């Protein structure tokens, strides 16, 4: 099989539109998606035989257009294939989980469109099984068409929480409550500015209507401060803005504190072909701005991939800029009412790294030394970002806490902790041994 | 030689050698300034395997040094300093071909002759002692009383125990001499000149430039791999495994096709976390940013050939570091010729974790005018002429 000229990683809106745009040039384009279907986080397709859960009209329309154009273009997709990285000789490494082989490809350009991940702050008890991300619950609903069972508490911050609550309500199991650290109703100015984004506003109002109809308490200005086990269930302690505490007993908890680029371990974007392909990023993994921006950004990257030059169309750039303003507005709207960061009040025994069982106190001890440790030293000596999740859960939180514990030290980023080495996902040694290394083939 | 304990010493480089030097000097009450261009264990020490071992050594000064190095690790573990960071274990050198068997047999004789406790294991014994090993293994030699240490943990321990604070992001650009003299009075840094009574250069691959020895000190890259935790398989391994081919491949082998020479020597080390550290390559260049699938898949193919169950284990990360090699294969340890109060300790290639602590001890002795506890005459930097110090 001939190597594609352009390889796109990720079958969400960014990856699909990048592939479509690049394919117009007549070059050979292929798309790599770890799952068995396209759509990404937003247009996640139900598993076979399951009824699709209704999305907003706007989203439905966008998906219909994108998926039709994509099937018309007949772009080959490698499903069940995980991008592992770009190696030192420029090979793009893809683990084909269907045949258990690591494939080494040599495209001219690779577009990384791996989307976003949810950000979750550590909280005492967040590691218990039964506590997941709110987005995880949403994905489950999209795939299975049913709501999570039992009584569910949603907590954290941001519009995703109300979207998940509304979807749960529509599927017949509204959550106990939504604990929201911000209070959009009190943010008059950003609230008014939302009028400039009627589609987003209409979507939000639609969710709020469902929440109101099902009498789901939306506890604004409140924080989930602690989760405790209570037999098979959880008791969740929530602190309101006035300092009063209440306890919810529930079966499941969905946490969400925003989204951030899923760029863990990804190779840096590069234009000069030092060794190997030009590397581009598109969509939420470049800048988490939501689905509309992701699609426009994918087109931008697709064009860049074929021309190797900045050839962004003005209307795509305009779209991306507009979504950036919208996201900034949403961030102000949902800004926590309590100025103190949730990170400031974490007790020392709160788990920070779930893989290696390292706590906030372990990090505090390292940071309290007279000298200022670098991110890499904190990783080595505290084992943060060293576990099986490769830092997805703790790197960003660790970097943020380091800055709080030692503000005078040079800031460390999540990438300082995770590094940029492949594999970006753990990969079976057997599959690597069977890697059809081109180096071996050609010599 | 008069004893003259300097009251202040600057150590350049906070890899394992610089950190150990600072530790032993601080223990004597010397005020040490430890400077690093980036941060502790930022270079080879932070990306090494960590065999504390004589198993691959041939009789000679390096074997003598390594024996002293291993003994110091054991003593410091007993004393508590390295208690939980030195893993005591055997090394098993495994032969899987007739050629390897014969090399290994004579190698074992040499080790035994030098007083190393070794045990020959035939195929049947081996199976019993090491069930995880493939049936391709024909024989093995167990080298007793060895161990493993992780470079950055040792550095952290040495710095913490001695209360040494590293001046990070402080690259030394040259040595400053008293006018016309052979005394160094300061080191030059972008932050200005820093003064001390004596200077020790332990700057790994940064040393060549400081000493004018770029032709003699050369970078040698190594790629390493780390797996997820697999406690049962890990516990089933009585020690580390070294492929008998390692004995044939120490030093780089020339490769065809105009590619930089690279050698492959397989070592599988079961770590106390339950993970495995698997290495590695020897490549004659200094780019440590990348790992390549060619090297990684070859290393892993060798590993699976010896321990088949590894095929079902997941690789978590690859990484790479750059050793500092010397053209004649021996490190540089001693006073810098022409300078009365400046010293160098570098060029340990693939042995600096093993030799780091003992070298630190030796440097503290030298700097304080005592005779060193091991014979370092073969490592005398004066063997290279034209050693010109950047000033
Ligand atoms: C939980 C969650 C809920 C969200 N809800 C909303 C919402 O309600 N409204 C909204 O506008 N936006 C929402 N977003 C944001 C929205 O998903 C994104 O803006 C949009 O999907 C981004 O498109 P994308 O193509 O950049 O990434 P994605 O749609 O996330 O697509 C990335 C694709 O890459 C694949 N992938 C990732 N890594 C690899 C790899 N190593 N190898 C192979 N494939 C890989 C993934 O399986 C996925 O299919 C949500 C995001 C998350 C994480
Ligand atoms: C892949 C690999 C595997 C290995 N396996 C083993 C093994 O199993 N057993 C073993 O014993 N050894 C092993 N080694 C070798 C061992 O890691 C090294 O010999 C040892 O770490 C060298 O330590 P060092 O302190 O001399 O140098 P480094 O660790 O390289 O430290 C030098 C320090 O000096 C600093 N520096 C450089 N220039 C300047 C300057 N101008 N000013 C200030 N600071 C400067 C650097 O930032 C660095 O921190 C391995 C090495 C590698 C790369």
Image (spheres, coloured by chain):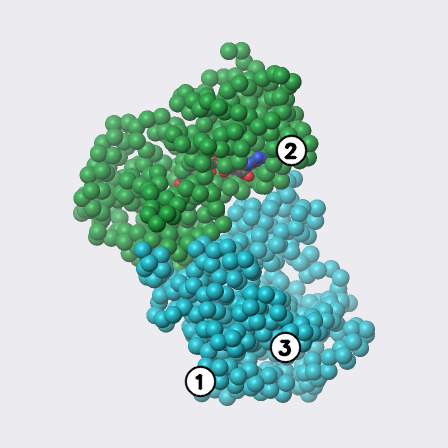
Asked if one can make out residue B151 in the rendered structure from this viewpoint, the answer is no
Q: Which chain is cyan?
A: A
Q: Which chain is green?
A: B
Give the quadrant of ligand 1. bottom right
Crowding at label 2, few (<14), some or many (≥20) Cα neighbours within 10 Å? some
Q: Is mark 2 within 8 Å of ligand 2?
A: yes
Q: According to the image, label 2 marks what residue?
A: B189
Residue extending farthest right = A189
Nearer to us: label 3 or label 1: 3
Nearer to us: label 1 or label 2: 2
Inter-mark Cα distance, 1 to 2? 66 Å
Choose between B15 and A396: the one closer to the eye: B15
Which structural element holds mark 2?
A: strand
Query: What chain does mark 1 sit on?
Result: A
Query: What chain does mark 2 sit on?
Result: B
**Residue B84 at what x, y percent from top left?**
46, 41
Q: Is B19 placed above or below A254 here?
A: above
Choose between A36 and B380: the one closer to the eye: B380
Discs 3, 2 touching: Cβ within 8 Å: no
Q: In the image, which disc is placed on residue A48?
A: 1
Which structural element holds mark 1?
A: loop
**Residue A386 at what x, y percent from top left?**
50, 54
Q: According to the image, label 3 marks what residue?
A: A292
* The quadrant where residue A297 appears: bottom right
Task: Report the side of B240 relative to A20 (left or right).
Answer: left
Asked if one can make out residue A43 in the rendered structure from this viewpoint, the answer is yes
Discs 1, 2 touching: Cβ within 8 Å: no
Crowding at label 3, few (<14), some or many (≥20) Cα neighbours within 10 Å? some
Q: Is mark 3 within 8 Å of ligand 1?
A: yes
Choose between A430 and A360: the one closer to the eye: A430
């Amino acid at each position: 099989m001939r190597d594609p000229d352009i390889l796109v990683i990720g079958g969400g809106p960014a990856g699909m539109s990048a592939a479509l745009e690049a394919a117009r040039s007549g070059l050979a384009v292929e798309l790599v998606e770890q799952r068995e279907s396209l759509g990404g986080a937003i247009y996640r397709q139900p598993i076979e035989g399951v009824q699709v859960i209704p999305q907003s009209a706007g989203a439905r329309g966008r998906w219909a257009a994108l998926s039709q154009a994509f099937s018309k273009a007949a772009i080959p997709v490698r499903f069940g294939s995980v991008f592992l990285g770009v190696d030192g000789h420029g090979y793009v490494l893809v683990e084909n989980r269907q045949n258990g082989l690591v494939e080494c490809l040599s495209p001219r350009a690779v577009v990384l469109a791996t989307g976003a991940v949810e950000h979750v702050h550590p909280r005492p008890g967040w590691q218990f099984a039964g506590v997941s991300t709110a987005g995880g619950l949403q994905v489950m609903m999209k795939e299975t068409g049913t709501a999570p069972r039992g009584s569910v508490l949603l907590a954290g911050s941001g519009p995703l929480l109300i979207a998940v609550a509304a979807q749960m309500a529509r599927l017949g199991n509204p959550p106990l409550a939504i604990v929201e650290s911000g209070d959009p109703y009190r943010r008059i100015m950003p609230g008014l500015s939302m009028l400039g984004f009627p589609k987003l506003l209409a979507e939000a109002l639609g969710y709020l209507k469902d929440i109101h109809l099902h009498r789901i308490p939306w506890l604004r200005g409140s924080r989930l401060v602690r989760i405790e086990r209570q037999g098979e269930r959880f008791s969740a302690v929530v602190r309101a803005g006035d300092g009063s505490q209440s306890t919810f007993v529930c079966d499941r908890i969905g946490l969400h504190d925003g989204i951030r680029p899923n760029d863990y371990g990804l190779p840096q974007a590069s234009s000069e072909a030092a060794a190997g392909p030009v590397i581009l990023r598109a969509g939420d993994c470049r800048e988490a701005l939501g689905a509309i921006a992701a699609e426009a950004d994918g087109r931008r990257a697709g064009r860049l991939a074929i021309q190797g030059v900045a050839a962004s169309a003005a209307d795509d750039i305009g779209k991306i800029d507009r979504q950036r303003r919208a996201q900034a507005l949403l961030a102000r709207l949902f800004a926590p009412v309590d100025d103190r960061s949730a990170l400031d009040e974490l007790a020392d025994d709160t788990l920070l790294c779930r893989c290696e069982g390292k706590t906030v106190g372990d990090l505090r001890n390292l940071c309290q030394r007279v000298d200022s440790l670098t991110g890499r030293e904190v990783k080595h000596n505290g084992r943060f970002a060293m576990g099986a999740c490769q830092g997805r859960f703790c790197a960003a939180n660790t970097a943020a806490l380091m800055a709080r514990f030692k503000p005078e030290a040079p800031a460390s980023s999540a990438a300082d902790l995770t590094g940029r080495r492949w594999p970006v996902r753990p990969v079976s040694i057997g599959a690597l041994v069977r890697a059809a290394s081109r180096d071996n083939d050609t010599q | 030689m008069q004893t003259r304990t300097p009251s202040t010493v600057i150590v350049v480089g906070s890899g394992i050698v610089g950190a150990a030097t600072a530790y032993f000097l601080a223990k004597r009450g010397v005020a040490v300034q430890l400077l690093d261009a980036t941060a502790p264990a930022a270079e080879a020490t932070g990306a090494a395997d960590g065999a504390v071992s004589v198993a691959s050594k041939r009789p000679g000064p390096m074997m003598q040094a390594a024996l002293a190095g291993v003994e110091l690790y054991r003593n410091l573990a007993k004393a508590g300093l390295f208690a939980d960071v030195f893993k005591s274990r055997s090394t098993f050198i495994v032969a899987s071909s007739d050629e390897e068997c014969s090399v290994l047999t004579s190698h074992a004789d040499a080790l035994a002759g030098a007083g190393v406790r070794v045990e020959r294991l035939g195929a049947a014994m081996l199976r019993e002692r090491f069930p995880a090993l493939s049936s391709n293994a024909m024989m093995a030699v167990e080298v007793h009383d060895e161990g493993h240490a992780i470079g950055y943990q040792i550095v952290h321990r040495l710095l913490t125990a001695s209360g040494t604070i590293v001046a990070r992001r402080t690259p030394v650009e040259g040595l400053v001499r008293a006018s016309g003299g052979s005394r160094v009075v300061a080191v030059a840094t972008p932050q200005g000149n820093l003064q001390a009574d004596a200077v020790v250069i332990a700057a790994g691959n940064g040393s060549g430039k400081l000493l004018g020895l770029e032709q003699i000190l050369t970078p040698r890259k190594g790629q390493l791999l780390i797996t997820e935790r697999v406690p049962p398989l890990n516990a089933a391994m009585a020690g580390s495994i070294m492929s008998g081919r390692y004995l044939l491949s120490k030093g780089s082998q020339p490769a065809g096709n105009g590619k930089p020479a690279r050698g492959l020597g397989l070592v599988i080390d079961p770590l106390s976390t339950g993970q495995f550290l698997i290495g590695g390559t020897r490549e004659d260049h200094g780019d440590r940013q990348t790992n390549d699938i060619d090297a990684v898949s070859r290393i892993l193919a060798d590993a699976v050939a010896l321990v088949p169950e590894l095929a079902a284990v997941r690789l978590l990360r690859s990484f790479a570091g750059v050793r500092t090699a010397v053209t004649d294969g021996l490190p540089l340890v001693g006073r810098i010729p022409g300078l009365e109060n400046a010293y160098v300790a570098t060029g340990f290639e693939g042995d600096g974790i093993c030799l780091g602590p003992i070298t630190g001890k030796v440097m503290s002795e030298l700097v304080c005018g005592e005779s060193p506890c091991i014979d370092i005459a073969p490592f005398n930097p004066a063997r290279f002429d034209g050693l010109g110090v950047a000033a």
